[in-house]
């Protein structure tokens, strides 16, 4: 097993994921992340000799089609039903704000 996950590593992962973890939660999440990594290390112990690699567990094959807007003639009706529009597009609220203004 690898060395234990540190609280600094957990803080770093949380920062990358844009999660706020306070100091009281840090020990809990450090233990959790360490256990998750341990589970993946257990998988490395499985004997996979003779097992062919797979990229999918299903025999389904993607059916590709040309990317063509089929309902473009209904654009006006669609935009009339949208709560907010601008320049022929539907406006939606910002979900991820990377400007740093709301931190």
Image (spheres, rainbow, N blue to C red):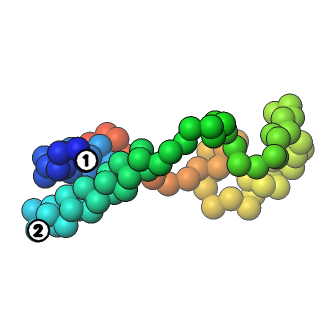
Q: Is residue 68 left or right of residue 48?
A: right
Considering depth in this image, is 4 or 15 the residue closer to the camera?
4
Viewer-closest of 32 and 100: 32
**Circle 2 residues within 10 Å: few <14, some 14–19, many ≥20:** few
What percent of the width, then of the height, locates residue 90? 65, 49
Residue 91: where, in percent of width, then height?
58, 50
Q: Residue furthest left?
A: 23
Q: Write the residue at 68% across / 59% down.
A: 82
| Residues marked 2 and 1 touching at CB (< 8 Å) | no
Residue 96 in view in this figure: no
**Label 1: which secondary element:** loop
Give me the disc on residue 14.
none
- The residue under the point 86% across, 31% down is 66
Q: Position of residue 49 (x, y in %)?
A: 56, 38
Q: Does residue 35 appear left or right of residue 60 in this picture?
A: left
Determine the secondary structure under disc 2: loop
Mark on residue 24?
A: 2
The residue depicted at 74 percent of the width and 53 percent of the height is 79
Instruction: Where is residue 17? Give x, y as percent.
Output: 33, 48
Which numbered tag is attached to residue 1? 1
Question: Nearest the camera: 59 or 70?
Answer: 59
Please name whichever residue, 53 or 77, is drawn nearer the observer in this view of the structure.
Answer: 53
Earlier in the chain: of badge 2 and badge 1, it is: 1
Residue at x 37% of width, y 56% of height = 39
- Density class for disc 1 (Cα within 10 Å; few <14, some 14-19, many ≥20) is few
> How many numbered callouts?
2
> For this view, does 63 lie left or right of residue 20?
right
Query: Marks 2 and 1, how far apart in space?
Result: 27 Å
């Amino acid at each position: 097993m690898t060395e234990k996950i540190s609280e600094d590593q957990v803080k770093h992962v949380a920062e990358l994921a844009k999660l706020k973890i306070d100091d009281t939660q840090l020990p809990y999440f450090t233990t959790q992340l360490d256990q998750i990594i341990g589970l993946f290390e257990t998988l490395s112990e499985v004997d996979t000799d003779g097992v062919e690699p797979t990229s999918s567990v299903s025999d389904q094959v993607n059916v590709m089609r040309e990317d063509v807007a089929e309902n473009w003639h209904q654009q006006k009706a669609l935009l009339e039903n949208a709560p907010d529009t601008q320049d022929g597009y539907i406006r939606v609220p910002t979900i991820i704000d990377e400007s740093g203004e709301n931190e």
